[in-house]
Amino acid sequence: MAEKGGMDVINSTLCYLERGDEYLMLHRVKKRNDVNHDKWIGVGGKFLEGESPEECILRETEEETGLQLTEYRYRGLVTFVSDEAEGEFMHLFTATGWTGTPHPCDEGELQWIKKAQLRALPMWEGDKIFLKLLEEDAPFFSLKLRYEGEHLVQAALNGRPLT
């Protein structure tokens, strides 16, 4: 659905699988021309035609990890604006229950990382903001992040600028 000006917006999902004080993180090192190359992120990906956020995160988590989510929560909507990439609405989830056996991911290396150590890893600046909101168990939120290149130049939480 293109709006005036012909700009398409990507819909994607991101999920942090939570095990005690750890998250399952994906170190993106396997794909060429990956906007996330060498960054640590959760698992997820782009919607297929007709998918809901929940259907997308269930499919993407299984594709990337081999695990089927049984307990998960929709935590927030992150709007990405960039001078180098298409706009994106990212639907953010956390999960505390799953079944299945993990398998290697073709997009990077999966690793359990202690939450306290996460922010020291290479990651997008805005990811640190929503990870903090998840840690604080913030109610459902809307976070807008505007990037110039890899530099975060603006962040707004629930419509209010963050300083």
Image: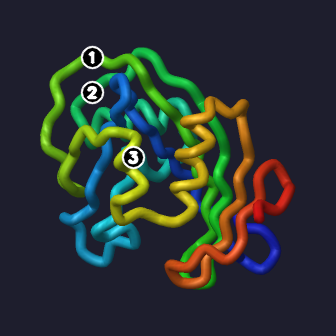
Quarter that holds the N terminus = bottom right
Q: Which residue is drawn at the image coordinates 13% and 43% (left, top)?
A: 104
Q: Which residue is drawn at the image coordinates 24% and 57% (left, top)?
A: 107
Which amino acid does the dot numbered 3 rest on? Gly
Q: Which residue is drawn at the image coordinates 55% and 77% (left, top)?
A: 85
Crowding at label 3, few (<14), some or many (≥20) Cα neighbours within 10 Å?
A: many
Which amino acid does the dot numbered 1 rest on? Thr
Residue 8 visible in the current orientation: no
List x then y, in percent, for residue 62: 30, 33
Residue 157 visible in the current orientation: yes
Whether 154 is drawn above or below 26: the answer is: below
Secondary-structure class at tag 2: strand
Residue 83 figure quarter: bottom right
Q: CA distance from mark 2 to mark 3?
A: 14 Å
Secondary-structure class at tag 1: strand
**Mark 1 touches mark 2? (CB < 8 Å):** yes
**Mark 3 touches mark 1? (CB < 8 Å):** no
Tell me: 93 left or right of 155: left
**Residue position for label 3:** 42
**Marker disc for residue 67:** 2
Q: Which residue is drawn at the image coordinates 37% and 59% (left, top)?
A: 120
Secondary-structure class at tag 3: loop
**Marker disc for residue 99:** 1
List x then y, in percent, for residue 100: 21, 20
Q: CA distance from mark 1 to mark 2?
A: 6 Å
First in sequence: mark 1 vs mark 2: 2
